[in-house]
Image: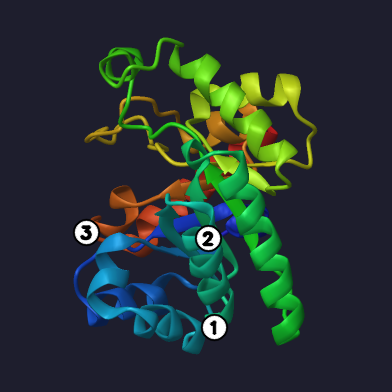
Amino acid sequence: MLSKELEFKKKLIVALDLHDLLEAQILVKQLKSYVGFFKVGHQLFTRYGPAATKMIQDEGGEIFLDLKYHDIPNTVKLAVNAAVSLKVNMLNFHALGGRAMMVAAVKSSQAAAKELHLSPPVLLAVTILTSLADPDLIELGISSSVSKEVQSLARMAYDAGVNGVVASPQEIAIIREVLPDNFLIVTPGVRLKDSKGDDQKRFLTPREALQAGADYIVVGRPIVKAPDPVRAAHEILHDMSLSLA
């Protein structure tokens, strides 16, 4: 692999959306040289709990804990405190939980990290899930379009002191219009052009996402379910490197 492609590994997050810890460990061993973070979501964490994050740490990987907290401020405050104690590098919660909830998460993260002598994890607010489109928002009683709702939620997260957002690559430009470049954007819904979209309704290629201004991209099934995950990761990194062309 070319060195310029490996330079992009820090921007690549692989989603370990699996039900078996041993299978996840095999993938971490295979991919840790090509990946910046491994995302642990509901499936793996619900089955194995902190053993899932410890496995990644033992293998030398960094962790994005993707549990999308969404509850009253005090409950989220306590959950974030627990997550910091696991020494994860990123974690997230739903922006739709509101400003007070996000402020509580930020304060809890900073206080817990200080107490444990750790660097605070990157905090991300989930805007609108990439499986949702405008008709879905109407059904949920949200009158604004996906793009307007994402922009509004991102601005609220920034004002609350959150480090960045999780947003579809198609909403990157509208976030960059209103918020500074150091406000991070993590984008799921990233696929190579010949990949199936599955339930992602708003997706771009890795190159397109980075050119639009994404800081990190999340890739799951196109790597995790590939016959050769390492080769698939190489292809993703190659496409990412083309963003410089």
Residue drawn at x 49%, y 73% is 32
As drawn, 78 above or below 1: below
Residue drawn at x 68%, y 48% is 162
Q: Which residue in the protein does label 2 denote?
A: 74
Amino acid type indicated by mark 2: Asn
Q: Which residue in the protein does label 1 denote?
A: 60
Residue 82 in percent (x, y) is at: 51, 76
Q: Which image quarter is the N terminus in? A: bottom right
Label 1 or label 2, whichever lies nearer to me, is 2
Q: Please say if the residues under marks 1 and 2 sit with CB atoms less than 8 Å apart.
A: no
As drawn, 137 above or below 154: above
Left/right placement of residue 154 relative to residue 67 reads right
Q: Which residue in the protein does label 3 denote?
A: 227
In which image quadrant can residue 198 be found? Answer: top left
Residue 103 in percent (x, y) is at: 66, 50
Amino acid type indicated by mark 1: Gly
